Image: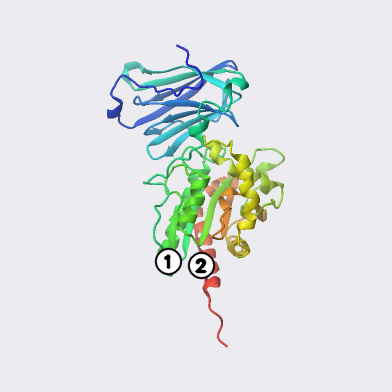
Amino acid sequence: MALTAGLLLPLLTPRDAAAQPAATATQAALSGDKTRTTFRIEMTAGVTAEIYTLANPYRVIVDLPDVSFRLPDGTGQAGAGLVQTFRYGLFAEKKARIVLDTTGPVRIEKAAMTAASADKGIIFTFDMVTTAPESFGLGTGADRASEAPPPAPEGGPDKIKPKHAGKPIIMIDPGHGGIDGGAVSASNILEKNVVLAVGTELAKQLTATGRYDVRLTRSSDVFISLDQRLNLSTQNDVDLFISLHADSLADTNGASGIRGATVYTLSERASDEHARRMAEKENASDAVAGLSVANSQADDAVKNILFDLMKRETANFSTDFSNVLIRQLKRTTLLSRVPQRAAAFKVLKQTHSPSVLVELGYLSHPEDEKLLNAPAWHKQTANAIATAIETYFSKRTAGPSAP
């Protein structure tokens, strides 16, 4: 029976849903053409699935309960028919998500779960067919997709903790996570894993000094929205916010020859076109995870008043830390051609504390790719950042020199 757009589609296997164990997805594929495309995923057990659509850009969202993904490397990177690419991962605690980027507005038909051969799990399929933009609107899930997921109580954002007297609070923000994998290298190294490795190593080194109260926006492979990252920083009243990323460029105009680390600070106007594009890409991470981006005009209004709200002192402190960090990184890490840049990164909209975004390198460059995947390099780079933090806070807390 055909299912029309505008419905959430609850799909159950005959067994008792309440007693379901955690399921694992093992294979996923697309087939079909530009008129009708089928998505097929194999799982070890049946679960309840909800399917809806979103516009701006056009996407199909599949929400699942406690499902883990053990799919072959590169799954979803190549599209077919009406789907350009798809991605998958943890969206919140006990909640997984699949996001399919479509070439235009689609409606969902013939969704079903059937038993696999020899009773080895289930096969979940649904068909996507083209539909008119005027009938599609913002999609069937526009209202619910605008709501960010709650922070995960385990393995996600730290709970709000009281300050330790006399200890600066450092918040380390490993970018992306869960369904949002970030950049991908030629050998399928994911940005989200690189920055989590460096972030946890940095937290370990800073904690070992006993001089800092160290907190992470995420400590596992879970999605955290940009608003959640900002809220965690504000609620924890942090003294320094460091967001970690690793870029990748399309192999055009010599992009594969670009490498090295870059430190970004917040600016209403980007320092150059490269910085503007970088901020635009990072600011789109919520859409990557299937959140609504229809409120972009409101976000622009917030951006326009941001710089009236920011204290000049806070902006200056961000620049001061950027200077210290660049001096320290260049001793052990190759820097990009222009290592200090600025742009309107949403995650840096910190009116209460200095903040920087560090692009550790380029996954699109073969040599950077090797380094970004090397534990020894993770420790070395974390040490450089930790040393810069030590220098920065030593300068800020130093009393007046004796006469």
Residue 323's label in the rendered image is none
Towards the viewer: 324 or 215: 215
Number of residues whose C-alpha sits closer than 10 Å to that of mark 2, classed few (under 14), some (14–19) or many (20 or more): some
Element carrying mark 2: helix
240 vs 251: above or below: below
383 vs 13: above or below: below
Tell me which residue sits at (40%, 66%) in the image.
210
Q: Dividing the image into 4 quarters, which one contains the N terminus?
A: top left
245 vs 92: above or below: below
- Residue 176 point in image, percent of width and height: 51, 44
* Count of numbered circles in the view: 2
Number of residues whose C-alpha sits closer than 10 Å to that of mark 1, classed few (under 14), some (14–19) or many (20 or more): few
Tell me which residue sits at (39%, 52%) in the image.
159
**Residue 131 occupies which quadrant of the picture?**
top right
Element carrying mark 1: helix
Towards the viewer: 312 or 360: 312
Q: Which residue is mark 2?
A: 390
Q: Is residue 126 left or right of residue 93?
A: right
Towards the viewer: 19 or 232: 232
- Residue 40 point in image, percent of width and height: 46, 21
Mark 2–mark 1 contact, CB under 8 Å?
A: yes
Q: Earlier in the sequence, mark 2 or mark 1?
A: 1
Residue 209's label in the rendered image is 1
Q: Dividing the image into 4 quarters, which one contains the C terminus?
A: bottom right
How far is the residue under mark 2 from the one under mark 1? 10 Å
